[in-house]
Structures are given as structure tokens and as C-alpha cells.
Image (cartoon, coloured by chain):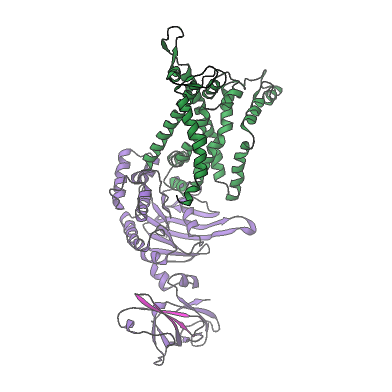
Amino acid sequence: MQDHGDACRLTGLGRTYGRGASAHHALGGIDLAIRANEFFTLLGPSGCGKTTLLRLIAGFDQPTVGEIAIFGRNVAGMPPEDRPVNTVFQHYALFPHLTVAENVGFALRMLGRPRTEIAATVARMVELVGLEGMEKRRPDQLSGGQKQRVALARALAPGPKILLLDEPLSALDAKLRQRMRSELKALQRETGITFVFVTHDQDEALAMSDRIAVMQGGKVQQLGRPEEIYEAPANRFVADFIGGANLIPARMGPEGAVAEGLGTIPATGTGGAEVTLAIRPERLAILPAGGHQPGDLGPLTVAERIYMGNELSFRLEGAAVPLHVTLPRGGLRGALDFAPGDRVALRPEAGAIRLLAS
Amino acid sequence: MKLHRLLLAPSLGTILIFMALPIALTTLYSVLTPAQHGGVIWQPSGEAYVRLMFERDIFDDTLSFNADYLQILGRSALQAGFATILCLLIGLPTAWFIATRPPAQKSLWLMLVTVPYWVNLLVRTIALLLMLRDEGPINGALQSMGLTDGPLPLAYNNFAIGLGLVSSFLPFMILPLYAAIERFDFSLLEAAYDLHASRWQAVWSVILPILRPGLIAGGLLVFIPGIGSYLAPDILGGGKTLMLGNLIGMQFQGSRNWPFGAALSTVLMSVTLIALILVARRAAREAA
């Protein structure tokens, strides 16, 4: 990967708060190359360092160690106002004393651009986010979704090379969040600007991103396309955080991994080693116990049946940990149903079981 | 009547008896005829208001324009305005400092702001005079260090009055500004920098406009008592420069012209009220 193709290159980036024994390492040794024109997501639970990372790129905070290069240029010590980067803030941070148009034109006014240019850009941005007719309103006269659009238009107006988005959808209701996802993705494609999107919501990350960096404990746990992250989680944390896989402790035997109450899962590895099996709840078929075939797991007991409209989920007991199985409703598989107390077996899809080092 | 309305009765009663009635009485007195040794004769007269701008010849009753009293009003407004600006320049950084302290420290700093109020205003004003006198510690220190040959004229002038006004009313500026800054959303400042604003641009385009209600409140709280202030001009000014407050005081003491004093008070009150209404209407228009 050469420097020029990267919108943002982070090298050995670390941020430590405090000193000595009470020091808190918010970020430790981050190496990342965010490509130009990519929708890049930093995904992780709160406190994982994703927002700290975003603030370092924006220039609101300075790294303790390491370097940030934006389009090949080291931005160490460069204040936020000089960086070719703009931010969509989590709670929008719209200027309450300014109208929609004045908010959107703010950056261009600060840069001293001519009035005619500002007016033209503001009109273009307002149209881009679909807020025509709202130009004269003030933020307190807007709905959450409209504020969101103003924040987007305001950040895009100065023509940033990178747009940073700090959990921009978290303050919206579920329905609007769905719609804004598609709109954000479309906006990114349309503008061709590199988006760096911070979220703790895995659905958001999977639906929009070109690539995702899953973060935890100030480190990148896995970097990859949504499919890679979901289908081939690199470790327990990623498997659990994304999609909530069943994580089953097992021990390597001569014929494969042996898991309590489930049987032997064909796999190769060092004999006697402790491993974790990761299986997605939707990649298991559930069958009545008895018609047992080789490769089936179990038998197990249904402990709980959870009806969720579009899917049906079971909690099963009998293994070392409770297992979750999810069946989509409708179709042939939807015809199967079980009640608590039923004895069942599980049949994993081919390649569904991933072996993770404990 | 609902019970909770009774909760307001003591304060409403107090306002009625000790504020509304005296104001009404003052306004009424301003259109009566002065009695010989203070007090009024219950006979309607507009003479007090005529006197504000005109002088009546004692022999032939002709009126000639007299700007003396208008000048006093103008001087008082200027002095109060000057004190307001000074309070703003001192109060804004102070309020900013307090509002950005950790919560546990804020109350300590706020308490320190109110410490001057533990001492009576008269005592504080006299103490300030003692500091500023020719023989006071400031002039003493300046001379002993050889910085000045003789005493600087610090007391008994407009400078001393201004200093008195600032020291009396500064907390009235700090407290509303503190309240405004306390509510200020600091992510707006980050947003301003993010959107390419320099430090000064952020101050002018974001901080000051958003703090404006606090600035206006603080300004009014300093300007209104400042324009009618009595003690500072009387003690620190040595009574040499007449201010509105002293002029009004004189009408009820020395020269014993109650209606004229009442008329001056009514004018001062009306000017203040009009200013307040204008500010409130502008604020309401901007909120709409």
C-alpha cells in the first residue's frame, strides 16, 4: 500500500491519559491505513477508543505517541481548523443562534470565501441533503432527522477530504436510523469523500461500510470487509461483539474438538489444547433428537422459546454454556417448532463452526 | 383560590406595598406643587417636568431652555455606561474561569464573588476612598517607590466614581454571565474550530452571540443601578460632580423640592423601563 492511495495513515498511534500508575491507555499502538474514497467504520463498545481515535484525526486531541498522515501529509501539531477534515458530531452541535443556511455556510464564511460562492455552495448542500425550504429555520425548529442533515451539509460544505462521523445516527429513532443509513451510504458514493464513521452498532457498521476496524481496549481487534468480520471473526471478542456468536469451550482430541454435551467436531489442532468454538445462531439447524446423523450435535434440551416476529429463537441447555439457535420464519424451516423440554439435536451448516484459540 | 397560589401571597403583598405603591406615589408627587419645607401641596402642577429642561425667569415668568439637568442625566448615563463596559471586560474572563472549573470548585469561587456583599456598601465605599486619598496607601506606595513626585489625584473625581461603580456592581455582571457560560455547550466550540474558525472567529461568531442574553442581563444589572447610583458619586466624587442620584437626593434633603425629585425619579424610571422593553422585544423577536 503506497502512501498516496491512503486518505489517512495512522502509524503506531497511542493516547495515554494521566501518568504513572493511574495512567489510562485509551489507545495503544494503532496502525491503520484508511483508503481514499472508502467508507471506513470504527466499531466497538463504548470506551474502546474509537472516539479518541476520531478526535485525534480531527485534531481536538493530540496523540501521546505515533503519527497521523492525511493524504500523505503529517498533521502533527496542526490545529483542527487547518486540517482538511470535517466532523459530524454525535449531538450535531449545530449553532443555535444561526439559521440552517448560516450553519451550512459557517465554514466558508470563516474561510473568507466570497458571498456568491457561499450562497451557491449552501444551496447545493441544502439540496444534497434534501432540506430545501428550511434554509431560514433555526436548529430548535427542526426534527432530529433534519438536524442530522444540517450537520451533514455543514460538514460537507467546505469540501473536506475526509468526513468524520461520530455516532451520527445514535440520537435518531430506529426507523429514521434505517433510512439515514442508506442515505449516508449513497451520499458517500455520490461525493466520493472518504468517510470515517464511528459506531457501536454492528448492524450500522455491516450495512454501510466498505471496511470495518473492530476495536476493543484501545486496540484494533480485526480489520476487514463486513463479510470477513462477520463470517471469519479473528477472536472471541469479535465473534461475540458482532452478531453474538455461540462461544463454546472445547478441548482438542485425536478426532477433533470435543465439547461437553455436544460431541466431537472434526478439526485439526494440537491435542489437549483449550479452544473456543464459534457458531452463529442462524447457521444451526434444529431437529428432533433421535434421527441422529453423524456430525449432528447434542442431544440438548429446549429451555426457552423466544418469538420475535421475523424470527424464532431457542435457548438450549445441556452443553457447557447455553446455546442460542435462530430460525427465520416462513419457508420450510419455519414449519419446525419446539417447546421447552423438547429434546433436540443441532446440525451446523458446512463451514459454520470456527475454531478460535482460547 | 387554589392553595398553591397562596404561596405567592407574601411576595406579591410585599411587592405591592413596598414597590408598586411607592412608585405610584412618586409618580403622583411629581405632578403636585412643592410645599415650603418639603412635602407637597395637593394641587396639580406640571412645573416639575417643565423644570427638567427650562428655566423660568423669576420676574416675568418666561421660559428659557436649560440643559443643566439633561447634562447631569447624560453624564450619569455615560458614567454608568463606562462602568458597564469595564465590568464586562473584567467579568467575562472571571465568569468564564469559574464556569469552567470542576463542579466542586465552582461553588467556592461563586461564594468568593459574593464576599464583598458581606460588608455594607457604605463601609466598602468609604474604604475605597481611604485607599484612593492623597494620603492613602496607593499614593503612599507610589511616592515611596519614587514613581510619582506628588500624590496622584485618585479620589474625588470621575475616575474614583467609576472605580466605585465597578467595584459595587461587578458581581451583578459576573453572576448572569456565569449562568450563561455554565449552560454553554462546549462542543459548539469544537464544531467552530472543526469548521475552520480561528480563535477570534470562534469568539465573535459563536461564543459572544450565544452568551448574548447573559451579556445583556449583566449589562442591565450594572447599568440600571449605576445610572442612579448615589453613594459612589457622593463619597468618592466628593459631591463635586453632580450625578442623577445625588440630584434626586438633594431634592428631598437640601433644596426640598419633592415634586421635582419625584419627576426626576419618574424620568429615570421611564428611561430604564423603555430600555428594558426594547431589549425584551428584541430578544423575543430573535427567539421567534
State the residue in front, A115 or A315: A315
Residue B186: tell me if it is visible.
Answer: no
* Left or right relative to B278: residue A64: right
In the picture, the quarter occupied by the N terminus of chain A is bottom left
Residue B63 percent across, percent down from the top left: 41, 12
State the residue in front, A331 or A26: A331
> What residue is shown at x 50% (from left), y 56% (from top)?
A52
Residue A129 percent across, percent down from the top left: 31, 53
In the current view of this chain or complex, which residue is farthest to the front?
B42
* Residues shaded magenta: A303-325
* In the depicted structure, whether residue A263 falls above or below residue B60: below
The hue used for chain B is green
Query: Is most of the magenta stretch helix, strand or loop?
Result: strand
Tell me where residue B134 sits by quadrant. top right
> What residue is shown at x 33% (from left), y 81% (from top)?
A334
Instruction: State the purple chain.
Output: A
Q: Is residue A306 covered in magenta?
A: yes
In the current view of this chain or complex, which residue is farthest to the right?
B144
Residue A342 percent across, percent down from the top left: 42, 88
Q: Is residue B127 covered in magenta?
A: no
State the residue in front, A226 or A321: A321
State the residue in front, A264 or B229: B229
* In the depicted structure, whether residue B144 falls above or below residue A81: above
> What residue is shown at x 43% (from left), y 73% (from top)?
A232
